[in-house]
Amino acid sequence: MVSVIIPAYNAQAYLGECLESVLAQSFYDWEAIVVDDGSTDCTFEIAQKYSALDRRIRVLSTDNKGVSSARNSAISCIKGEWFTFLDSDDMLYPYALRAMLDVAEGADVICGGCERGDTVDDTRRNVNNVRHRVVSGAEALKEGLYQTGIQASACAKLYKTAVFRDVMFHADIRYEDLLY
């Protein structure tokens, strides 16, 4: 199982499209945990609506403490062997989870990619064109810090729960993704 962690603050304009992209996954053994981070709009109600439609979607509600705290709330209750972060204004390609899991054997982190576009259809790519490579932890750190290959974002990656369950975000810093 893959746990998809979705922190959401005042995300009513795009949370539905985000959750639709999770529902469209070609890999079905997932759970989505939407953390409403004290929204003042209809984010919580939208998340609840999707949760009522599909039992794999769970909703947590917290006081507004920021994205790091919201992510940490979800990490503490994930059920999956793997987990990933998806921002509420982002979408997954329908094959995203399957493509990353297909290369996961022996790894602790799988790094995917990100593309810009207004909808998933704007930047659709053929899954057969996906390349993969194995790098050491030191090389991954270097590429992330120098932004020469691996993106520093916590999103678009799968993390092995057994290794990362106790790794939490620091709530009081900017660029929390880089440290994670």
Image (cartoon, helix red, strand yellow):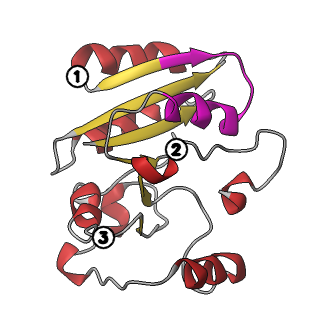
Q: Give the percent coordinates (x, y) of residue 26.
A: 15, 51
Query: Where residue 109 appears, x then y in whole percent?
Result: 43, 64
Vertically, is 166 above or below 53? below
In space, the residues marked 3 and 2 are separated at their CA atoms by 31 Å
Q: Residue at x 68, y 44 (%)?
A: 169
Tell me the kind of residue under disc 2: Asp
- Contact between marks 1 and 3 (CB within 8 A): the answer is no
Question: Which of disc 2 and disc 1 is earlier in sequence?
Answer: 1
Nearest-to-viewer mark from 3 and 2: 3
Quarter of the image with the C terminus in it: bottom right
- Secondary structure under tag 2 reads loop
Say which of 39 and 118 sits in front: 39
The three-letter code of the residue at mark 3 reads Gly
Q: Which residues are magenta?
A: 60-76
**Residue linked to disc 3:** 106
Give the mark toward the camera: 1 or 3.
3
- Residue marked by disc 1: 54
**Picture quadrant of residue 144:** bottom right
Q: Residue at x 52, y 44 (%)?
A: 89
Q: Provide the secondary structure element on which disc 3 rests.
A: loop
Q: Is residue 91 left or right of residue 25?
A: right
Q: Is residue 75 magenta?
A: yes
Determine which residue is flagged by label 2: 89
